[in-house]
Image (tube, helix red, strand yellow):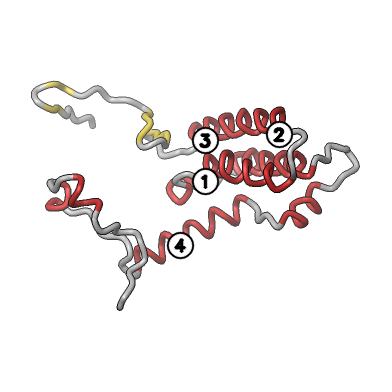
């Protein structure tokens, strides 16, 4: 059963996938396409960092990884958190390569697991779990405002102040 939707008299085209706020959403709500896009972007960024930060201190490499690669891998993660093992493994491989880059240790005999422990990095799966729990906490305890019809018609400045997702401080 198909419905025709229109805006200002123009019929909208049906699509199987679209990018919305930086997240690839498909009509079957599978996230493999989105994960493939972000892992590709994260891998390119990691390769760029590896080439350009070869002789830099470890702390700088770690900061660059966290700010430039992790931010891509974790953006909106509570929405698209992967459930397929292949998608999860592809994401974890990036973090393992990053650990080698930060530690400057590319020997085949080196243990990446021990590098991750030494760096104090949690798995990306654990990070996404924490992000989901933090979002749920904010929703349950009212730190995020519900968007209602009356909120949609306000001007941008009215919506921005106060920030609905910032912790509420009682004085």
Q: Is residue 33 above or below residue 153?
A: above
Residue 109, position as x, y percentages in the image: 90, 42
Q: Judge from the rendering whether residue 136 lies leftward or rightward of residue 158; answer left or right.
A: right
Q: Is residue 23 above or below residue 131?
A: above
Q: Judge from the rendering whether residue 169 lies leftward or rightward of residue 38; answer left or right.
A: left
Choose mark 3 or mark 4, whichever is in front.
4
- Of the numbered discs 2 and 3, the one sitting upstream in the chain is 3
Quadrant including the N terminus? top left
Task: Please identify the residue farthest to the bottom as the structure is shown.
Answer: 171
Q: Which residue is mark 2?
A: 53
> How far is mark 2 from mark 3, CA to CA?
31 Å
Which of the pair 142/55 is nearer the observer?
Answer: 55
Choose mark 2 or mark 4, whichever is in front.
2
Residue shown at 77%/41% (left/top)? Answer: 100
- Of the numbered discs 3 and 1, the one sitting upstream in the chain is 3
Choose mark 2 or mark 1, whichever is in front.
2
Graded by Cα atoms within 10 Å as few (under 14), some (14 to 19) or many (20 or more), the crowding at tag 1 reads: some
> How far is mark 3 from mark 4, CA to CA?
24 Å
Residue 146, position as x, y percentages in the image: 24, 58
> How far is mark 4 from mark 1, CA to CA?
13 Å
Quadrant including the C terminus? bottom left
* Residue 58 marker: none
Q: Which residue is mark 3?
A: 32
* Residue 134 marker: 4
Graded by Cα atoms within 10 Å as few (under 14), some (14 to 19) or many (20 or more), the crowding at tag 2 reads: some
- Of the numbered discs 2 and 4, the one sitting upstream in the chain is 2
Q: Which residue is mark 1?
A: 74
Q: Is residue 22 above or below residue 113?
A: above
- Of the numbered discs 4 and 1, the one sitting upstream in the chain is 1
> How far is mark 2 from mark 1, CA to CA?
23 Å
> How far is mark 3 from mark 1, CA to CA?
15 Å
């Amino acid at each position: 059963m198909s419905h025709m939707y229109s805006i200002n008299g123009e019929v909208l085209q049906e699509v199987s996938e679209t990018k919305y706020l930086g997240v690839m959403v498909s009509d079957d709500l599978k996230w493999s396409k989105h994960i493939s896009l972000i892992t590709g972007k994260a891998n390119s960024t990691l390769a760029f960092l590896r080439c350009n930060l070869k002789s830099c201190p470890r702390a700088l490499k770690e900061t660059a990884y966290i700010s430039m690669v992790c931010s891509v891998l974790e953006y909106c993660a509570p929405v698209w958190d992967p459930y397929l093992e292949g998608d999860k493994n592809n994401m974890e491989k990036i973090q393992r390569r990053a650990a080698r880059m930060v530690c400057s240790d590319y020997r085949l005999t080196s243990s990446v697991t021990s590098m991750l422990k030494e760096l104090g990095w949690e798995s990306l799966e654990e990070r996404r779990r924490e992000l989901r729990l933090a979002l749920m906490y904010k929703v349950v305890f009212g730190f995020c405002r519900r968007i209602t019809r009356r909120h949609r018609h306000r001007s941008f400045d009215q919506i921005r102040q106060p920030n609905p997702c910032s912790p509420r401080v009682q004085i």
